[in-house]
Image (cartoon, helix red, strand yellow):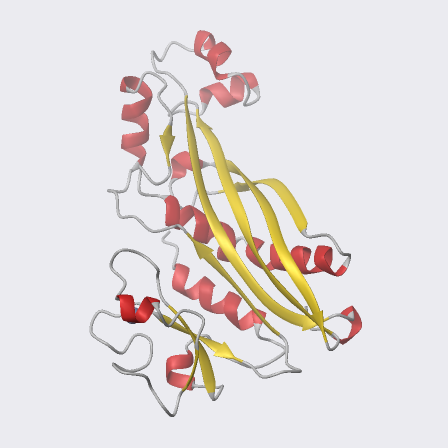
Amino acid sequence: MHVDPQLYRKAFQAYLRKGTPIEWSIKQERPTTHYIWWSRRDRHTRPTHRARDGQVFSWDNPPDGGHPGEDYNCRCRAEPYHGDGQEYVTHDLKGIGGSNERWKNLDFVRHFFQGAGRGVTLSEIGHLSEIAELWAYRHGALERWTKQIIGEVREARLTAQFDRSYSFENVQFSHGGGVVKGSFSGVTQLVHGMRAIEGETAYEFSDIFTDPLDIREWITGDEIPDRAFNLTELNGTAYPVTGSWRSHLRAKVFAEEDMSAY
Ligand SMILES: [Zn+2]
């Protein structure tokens, strides 16, 4: 079964905006009169577009070259700009790019026999964006995490953490379960009864590929791969699979939880 991240991203963005009925596909819908310009900020970004980061533009008055995404090969995006008195939340994954060739189950197995236990990263095996997006949108974790962060900030805490295991078999059967840890750090400001929040979360994924037949996890209760090695005669070596990515949260919500949609 293939995961369609676009679908989940869209559903999530719709959720974030349920207080204000705004679609993420604002290029077509244009629900606000103005937007904030955001570039990708990588080496392919036009310097002129990068210079527009964070600036507010009107849908009725495009800058040179047009709105985000309209110029040739432009990957910039428009974020709805709201005036005062309206809540908004944007929470986007970062650092999940990359196009390494994607490992299939057979590649996991081959590395088990030939890799001598060397760890691999999700980026290296071409699974980073799928794992991060499955976590975020399919498991609904980014939605819960957003709520948790806003709750912590309302309680005057500027950091938050989580640490949980999830099933990632939809990305590749070999993943089975994996642990995702997240650590948020941000800043906040109270302005006219509204709380502005901005911050970053760093995520760490970890899993251990134990064996192609799931025999070891069954024998050892999924711990101590070295000991597990002695218990089977597969002549392979378990290896860690790790990965990291980030997300950026920008929000303005009512300071009073009762008044807020978040
Ligand atoms: Zn651009």
**Location of residue 229 by image quarter:** top left
Provide residue 236's location: percent of width, then percent of height.
Answer: 34, 15
Instruction: Give the residue at x 49% y 33%.
Output: 206
Left or right position of 68 against 188: left
The quadrant of the picture occupied by the C terminus is bottom right
Provide residue 9's location: percent of width, then percent of height.
Answer: 46, 64
Left or right position of 186 against 105: right
Provide residue 73's location: percent of width, then percent of height.
Answer: 22, 69
Q: In the displayed structure, would residue 72 be above or below residue 133?
A: below
Instruction: Give the residue at x 29% y 38%.
Output: 104
Give the number of callouts: 0
Q: In the displayed structure, would residue 107 be above or below residue 54?
A: above
Q: Which quarter of the rendered image does ligand 1 occupy?
A: bottom left
Q: In the displayed structure, would residue 257 be above or below residue 238?
A: below
Task: Say whether residue 23 is visible.
Answer: no
Instruction: Give the residue at x 48% y 17%.
Output: 225
